[in-house]
Amino acid sequence: MSADADDIDDVRNVACGGWDGSECEGTVHCPPRCPRFVDKLGDRWTVRSVEPGDADRLVEMYDAFTIEHRAQGLPPAARARRVEWIESLFDGGNNVVAELGGRLLGHAVYTPTDVARPEIAVFVHPDAQGRGVGTELCRRLIADAAAAGREALDLYVTAGNKAARHVYGTLGFETVERDGDLHMVLPLDDPIATEVRWPPVVREGPTDLPEVDSRRRDSPLHPDHNG
């Protein structure tokens, strides 16, 4: 697990009493973005930093990825290579997972954690795609990176993936290079980096916007988005 993840989640993913966020203002112990997430079908997910034992669970998740679910060679096709790849991401990246009913069905990472502009990758289990999970994982990465003092986030996406490009564009990523795969960048002085850290009471219910705490705590990725 990365230093960024340790710093951000000193009291990691503090549990709340329920899923109605209309009155939740957050606490100093909350992660940069509330881990509760309700998808397009109304199912209730937890999007959280990785924990001991998640590496093995992610290996199982990636077993479901066939060739049509891979992009730019990721996740690796061979199981042994997937194990090594996941271990490398855990060693050098800030990793988050999406969990539903005890199953890990999404994984996102920015890496490395010791540079101003790390690169992100987002992967969603084939059974969970099209439900907004990938987009929520992106928002959590943006929140984590902003809270950790990163300056920007980079990503690469295939030019033909219009759905992914639309999602990334909606989140504020801009294309900076078109040479095969598209290179997109999100500066973390963009308003989205503040908005993703608003507590649920602001995002889910009308209220005056609070001041955002300005205190910041301090690859093998060419991902495609399968949100």
Image: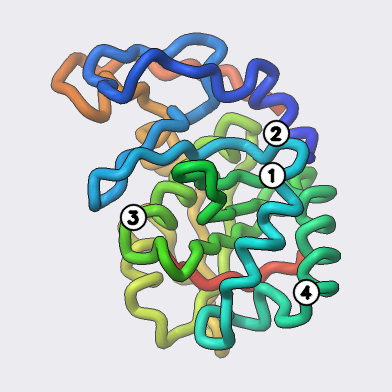
Task: Identify the secondary structure beneath mark 1.
Answer: strand
Compare residues 185 and 15 and report the one nearer the observer.
15
Question: How many C-alpha atoms fall within 10 Å of the one at disc 3: few (<14), some, or many (≥20)?
Answer: some
Tell me the CA gap for discs 1 and 3: 21 Å
Q: Position of residue 220 (x, y in %)?
A: 76, 68
Instruction: Identify residue for label 1.
Output: 94
79 lies above or below 86: below
Three-letter amino acid code of the residue under disc 1: Asn
- The answer to whether the residues at label 1 and label 3 have Cβ atoms under 8 Å apart is no
Q: Which mark is residue 147?
A: none
- The answer to whether the residues at label 2 and label 1 have Cβ atoms under 8 Å apart is yes
Earlier in the chain: of badge 4 and badge 3, it is 4
Q: Position of residue 148 (x, y in %)?
A: 65, 32
Instruction: Identify residue for label 2.
Output: 5
Three-letter amino acid code of the residue under disc 3: Gly
Instruction: Identify residue for label 3.
Output: 132
Instruction: Identify residue for label 4.
Output: 79
Earlier in the chain: of badge 3 and badge 2, it is 2
Task: Identify the secondary structure beneath mark 4.
Answer: helix
Earlier in the chain: of badge 4 and badge 2, it is 2
Task: Name the outermost residue toward the front.
Answer: 101
Residue pictured at 35% horizontal, 34% vertical: 195
181 lies above or below 202: below
